[in-house]
Image (cartoon, rainbow, N blue to C red):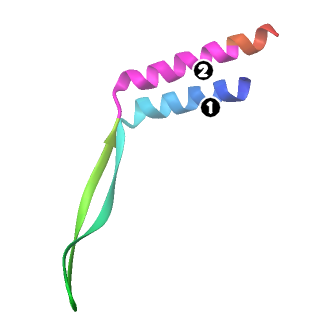
Amino acid sequence: MKILGIVLIIAGIAMFLMTGFSFTTEETVIDAGPLKLSADKEQSVAWPPYAGGIAVIAGFVLLAVGRKK
């Protein structure tokens, strides 16, 4: 429980600092025999700022529960 709490706290802080990330994928536009045309498409993943707060609070709760035993 303590390890999971620490991981949640670290992940929550990271979620506060970075509100998301983006990555590029290669997408095939035309594939007609020997002719192949592809394009790069940028996609992003974003999460709301309160998700980091929830993760930090959950981490502290798990640390508090782990200390009682």
Secondary structure at badge 1 equals helix
53 in the magenta segment: yes
Marker disc for residue 59: 2
Q: Which secondary structure class fits the magenta region best?
A: helix
Label 2 sits on a secondary structure element that is: helix
Work out whether 4 lies above or below 21. above
Task: Please provide percent x and percent y for residue 16.
Answer: 42, 29
Query: From the viewer's perspective, is 21 left or right of 56?
Result: left
Residue 4 appears left or right of 27:
right
Asked if marks 1 and 2 touch (Cβ < 8 Å), the reply is yes
The residue pinned by badge 1 equals 7
Above or below 11: residue 69: above
Pointer 2: residues within 10 angstroms few (<14), some, or many (20+)? Answer: many
The quadrant in which residue 68 appears is: top right
Question: Gap between marks 1 and 2, in whole Å?
Answer: 7 Å
Q: Which quadrant is home to the N terminus?
A: top right
Residues packed near mark 1 inside 10 Å, few (<14), some (14 to 19) or many (20 plus): some
Q: Which one is earlier in the sequence, the residue at label 1 or at label 2?
A: 1
Report x, y in % for residue 22.
Answer: 33, 50
Q: Amino acid at mark 1?
A: Val
The stretch in magenta equals 47-63
Q: At 51% from the left edge and 23% from the top edge, which residue is drawn?
A: 55
